[in-house]
Amino acid sequence: MIVLLYLDLYNLQCKVRAGLKVTQYLFVGIRKLCYFCFMRNGIILLLSALLFASCASLSRYPGVGRTKRYTFEHAQVPETFDGFRIAFISDTHYPSKFKRKHLHSLVRALRDLRPDLLLLGGDYHEGCEYVEELFAELAEATPPYGIDAVLGNHDYARCTDEVRTAMKHHGIRLLEHRNDTIRKGENFIIVSGVRNPFDLKTNGISPTTELQEDDFVILLVHTPDYVEDVPVPHTDLALAGHTHGGQVSFLRLWTPRTGSKYGTRLLSGRRASSHGLPVIITNGLGTSHVPLRICAPSEIVVVTLKKAP
Ligand SMILES: [Fe+2]
């Protein structure tokens, strides 16, 4: 009887111990699970924040995702050009995702920004019938130092004459391997425009070649690849479009189409060529292939020149 009672108590003790062990394991499991949840939620939160920071498009101008501002400081910026503001737009591909209401909104944004000079980077239209309307609107931006422009591959592929005629009609200066001198007071800067930068057989010598070393020169070219493909002597800053920032680009880790044979190196933003030349590449405004932009917002670029001490 006593032995049986002892065995029973022993079994009960074993069961309690086992129960405690199970509970302990459960607690450790739950704790580990919570830790995993916390880590997982933290990672999701961090990725979301990064994605938002990269993709955020907060603009009161429909069709213009953002205004991207740069200050460009250089010793050769003439004194009277200290603070001179240049707006740069490209790749309207009008109409695409960038439609008529967006064109009105773009001109409104440009007028509100009040730049001194407006530069256009090419790939303007999606059909000859839209050319006149597009340039008539853009000319309404009326910056005090006018508008300089180059053409893109789309403009050389079709409606080239229509584009040239419309630009001339609306007072837009087309720089096809030409240099435009912008004067302010007793100083000047030069905007140098490249003709079709994909035709290197014809345009393989940069229009900056004939300029002087102490000139302050901005090279306006449709594709950023040109500054890698061709020597661009005397250039201090290059402005380019064409890449659309990839149109779809996740943190620049995955960009299915870059539009540049140099991959994501010259995709968007302020970059440098392999020779150290500063290049600002805009995401542009419109779309091609698919009317879609993900994490590559449409934009107006504004560059403020600053004289380095
Ligand atoms: Fe292009």
Image: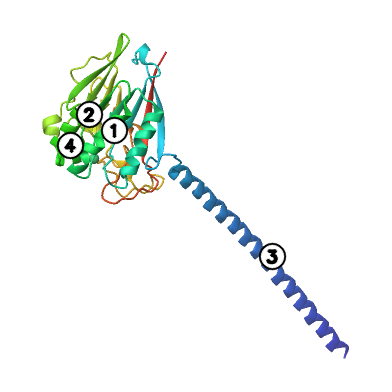
Q: Is residue 28 visible?
A: yes
State whether residue 261 is above or below residue 15.
Answer: above
Query: Which is more foreground, mark 2 or mark 3?
Result: 2
Q: Earlier in the sequence, mark 4 or mark 3?
A: 3
Q: Is mark 4 within 8 Å of ligand 1?
A: no
CA separation in Å, label 1 and label 2: 9 Å
Residue placed at 21% from the left, 16% from the top? 211
Query: Residue 198 got which mark?
Result: 4
Query: Which is more foreground, mark 4 or mark 2?
Result: 2
Q: Quadrant of ligand 1?
A: top left
Q: Is residue 196 visible?
A: no
CA separation in Å, label 2 and label 3: 76 Å
Q: Is mark 3 within 8 Å of ligand 1?
A: no
CA separation in Å, label 4 and label 3: 66 Å
Which structural element holds mark 4? loop
Q: Earlier in the sequence, mark 3 or mark 1?
A: 3
Query: Which is more foreground, mark 3 or mark 1?
Result: 1
CA separation in Å, label 4 and label 1: 25 Å
Q: Circle 3 is placed at which residue position?
A: 27
Tell me the quarter of the picture where residue 267 sits. top left
Q: Circle 2 is placed at which residue position?
A: 170
Residue placed at 31% from the left, 11% from the top? 187
Q: Earlier in the sequence, mark 4 or mark 1?
A: 1
Type of the residue with mark 1? Leu
Type of the residue with mark 3? Phe
Type of the residue with mark 2? His
Q: Circle 1 is placed at which residue position?
A: 138
Tell me the quarter of the picture where residue 83 sits. top left
